[in-house]
Image (cartoon, rainbow, N blue to C red):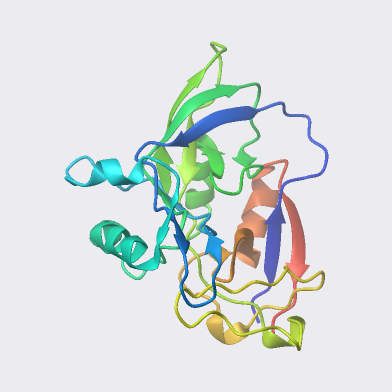
Amino acid sequence: MMRFYELRAPRESKYTGTLSARHKWGGLPGLRCPECGATWAGGMTAYPGVDLSTLPERGEYEKPRAEPFDEFVRLREWVRPLVPAGAPLLPGTTFGPLVGTATGTFSPLFFYYFEMPLVHREALERLQVEGVRGLSGFRTELRFRQKNHPELLELEVLPHGRLHPACTPPERPPPCPRCGRDAFRFPEDPILDASSLPAHTDLFRLSDFETIFIATEPFVEAVRHLGLDEADFREVPVR
């Protein structure tokens, strides 16, 4: 059976990289749900390859805010044809290349900002040569304050797979039937639901926790073989 690992930023790092950046076209607003009463924006997935320049309504995505449910749905459906087929579009999902400033040094796999995972172009190409599947990197529009710096690409890491019910609280309330909000904390001892895991990619986010990156055994082996430092892995059991 394939083994899976949570990919985490190390607690200590020799790198000093920091970002002040956002996605070029903004994103979906938060929503105010009439069913559960929550106002929320939980989408951490970005689609850096999405270009809204030809969308007449693109200005409606620029300002972060919360909207009533029906207005959120209207804005979501305008961009749905532009994202990968079947990709989720939660409140707060962002679009376009990363724009802003970068300072300091960056590890080959830079996962300190879970909403904008970065990779050196050379590291991405080496992982692809090693046979790692499903990695898509997009050019950023980051400005560096130092002359010598790597070319940083943003990885588009899509949500797939879910936690197994055995690791979630027995008293966990069901998701809101209207907006889908599912409010519970990530468990200390997670278990992955084997039936939900993808077979076409070696790196993905969890569908029910978009801040959690999951890597397959081939991904972990490739990272270690190539000596790509600053990647911390914790094996997660599957059931």
- Residue 103: % across, % down: 61, 21
Quarter of the image for the N terminus: give it. Answer: bottom right
Residue in the image at 71% along x and 26% along y:
16
- Residue 150: % across, % down: 54, 25
Q: Does 85 appear above or below 170? A: above
Is residue 51 shown to the viewer in this render? no
Quarter of the image for the C terminus: give it. Answer: bottom right
Residue in the image at 56% along x and 86% along y:
195
Is residue 212 shown to the viewer in this render? yes
Instruction: Report the side of 94 relative to 216 (left or right).
Output: left
- Residue 134: % across, % down: 45, 60
Residue in the image at 77% along x and 71% along y:
187
Instruction: Report the side of 33 relative to 161 (left or right).
Output: left
113 or 28: nearer the viewer: 28
The quadrant holding residue 63 is top left
- Residue 70: % across, % down: 33, 67
